[in-house]
Amino acid sequence: MVFANEIVNDEIIVYCAVDLYSKDSLFKCLYWYGDKFHTSVGFADVDTYRISIKPKSDAGLASEDFELYQLKLERDLIDFNLRDIVTKETKNIRELLIAKAFSNGEFDEEPVGEISDPVGFEIRK
Amino acid sequence: MEVIDKVTRKFKDLGKYDLQSEPGYYLLPFRFHRVTSEKEIIVNELGDYLILTNGTFERIVRRQISKDLDADLYGDLMANFFISEEIINPLIDVLATRYRTKKSFIDHFTALHIFVVSLRCEHTCHYCQVSRVTSDKDQFDMSQVHIDKGIDLMMQSPNPNVTMEFQGGEALLAFENIQYAIARSQKLALANNKTVTYVICTNLAVVTDEILEFCKENDVLISTSLDGPEFVHNENRKRPGRNSYELTISGIEKAREILGWDKVSALMTTSNLSLEYPVEIVDEYFNLGFKNMFLRPISPYGFAVKNEKKNKYNTEKFLTFYKIALNRIIEYNLKGSYFSEDYSTIILKKILTPFPVNYVDLNSPAGAINNVIVFNYEGSVYASDESRMLAEMKDYSFRLGHLDTHSYQQIFYGAKAYEIAEVWTNENLPGCSECAFQPYCGSDPIHNQATQGDMWGYRPTSTFCQRNMEVIRYLIDLMESDKAIKKIFERWIYGNRD
């Protein structure tokens, strides 16, 4: 089933495909809306997340702000999903980098490639 | 003609360096942020950054950057360690060394040891939470027993270069404490192989030639308070006679004459009144011959700190003040003077150099305990200067122990220190962990506790986050938009080489 993003009675509702968006990215995105909005994440159906934000009573939002916040939320969800892809893809290399940085040399390896000595420093001696 | 393969040729054929065995590339760890409506920034773990046109980050992640069609961008991404053609970059050890260098400010542990030698003061500054107008030395001066114990702990620091900073109240009201502490620490420093730098924080109201001669003999630096022109300074810093400004200026002149210009620095405290006069405050510092000044944020301690809306509003006002003042400072530089701003310089060093910055309020791990410790006048030990101010508001979250009852191990590695350690790196804080400006920023659990009621903090309403995100974004935008400003910023980082 196809769902359309909408604004219903001061509630902004956005739908995301489960196989395209990670759950982590949704929560990391919604974290930044907690100052002005009540937030919730659920399922519209098994393939679709339903994300809604509703302004807190003291948020002071004008009616024309709602569409802007809907656009912002849609864009932020994409940004946070992309960030999440980088975080997960690079998790191992980041851990390796930090382990090497704080190690006492036990993870050091010989540099790849040949070391040439055209000037004659006799670096191997 | 046959080309002879010279043995002295330093670079092999280009193809030799092409490690790509199949089309595509691997991502290295980096983060992304939108700088303006047209530009976005990506920053790697080391703090190297690239400014890109909007949409480029998505193309990078979706593997849409072509080695042939986007050759310049592809080269920049490779050279700046955002992508790699091998699953483990062959230069991983170089990356690790650079990461270690960035974090090397934690190598030696605590350097700054603050001794609150007296809480007594003859000023009644409205923003000061800690001082007392009294002549009761017994109750509000640090005892020699506690000075001894503080020095003993300082000598146990693994750091070979420590700083002993005397604060108050007005530290010079307990000058005999300072003399005693310097004499004792000098003896012990020799035995413990330590170099000690001495700093007295003073309003200079009670300074005398004899005190300054002592400072000269013992190589003591003076750090004073100057809030701006007379009408701002005297309004902020009240004392009988309303002559704080006059005394500070004459004290600065006297101290410069006896100690030398480079031994005297001044700090401003930003008050609500100060926010109305950014240009006048900058002009005051410039006209007094200072080569730098520090646009310090409004301290949250002692005010209606847990009012989120008020805090946010005050931070917006501070940011406007900061930008006007910074632009005035830049104006002076564009006209040929060397005159730098300290907060910007700290952040710019993090952005533009491979080196760490030893500034206790903007680091990860945070400076509390790692770089600074406070021995309060009555013997309590706090994780930072702000921690003792929080204690004046009856919040003892950052009291690590007491000089009478706790050992070095119990203070620096005790349960309280472990509790703070959970929140002192921004790498693991919600909201910070995905932030592109993480390498340029820091963690401040004490600010979080003071303004939001817990050490973790909540970034969407955090004034620390609001302020630093905008200051960092603004500095990057300034230097990317104007090469002359970037040159000025580089002079601030590397010093005046003229």
Image (spheres, rainbow, N blue to C red):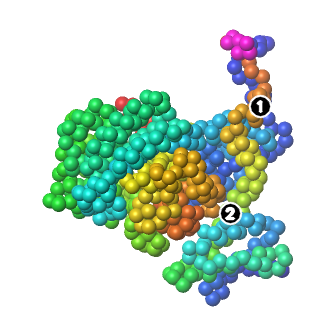
- Mark seen at residue A109: 1
- The residue pinned by badge 2 equals A80
- Left or right, A40 with respect to B127, comes to right
x then y, percent, for residue B158: 54, 37
- Left or right, B171 with respect to B418, comes to left
x then y, percent, for residue B450: 48, 65
The local crowd at label 1, few if under 14, some if 14 to 19, many if 20 or more residues have their Cα within 10 Å, is few
Give the overall secondary structure of the magenta segment: loop
Tag nearer the camera, 2 or 1: 1
Residue sitting at x 23%, y 34%: B213
Residue sitting at x 51%, y 62%: B397
Residue sitting at x 48%, y 31%: B192
The kind of residue tagged 1 is: Glu
Asked if badge 2 and badge 1 are on a common chain, one would say yes
Residue sitting at x 47%, y 72%: B306
| Secondary structure of the residue carrying numbered label 2 | helix
x then y, percent, for residue B203: 26, 50
* Mark-to-mark CA distance, 2 and 1: 35 Å
Q: Chain of mark 2?
A: A
- Mark seen at residue A26: none
Q: Chain of mark 1?
A: A
| Secondary structure of the residue carrying numbered label 1 | loop
Which region of the structure is painted magenta? A120-125
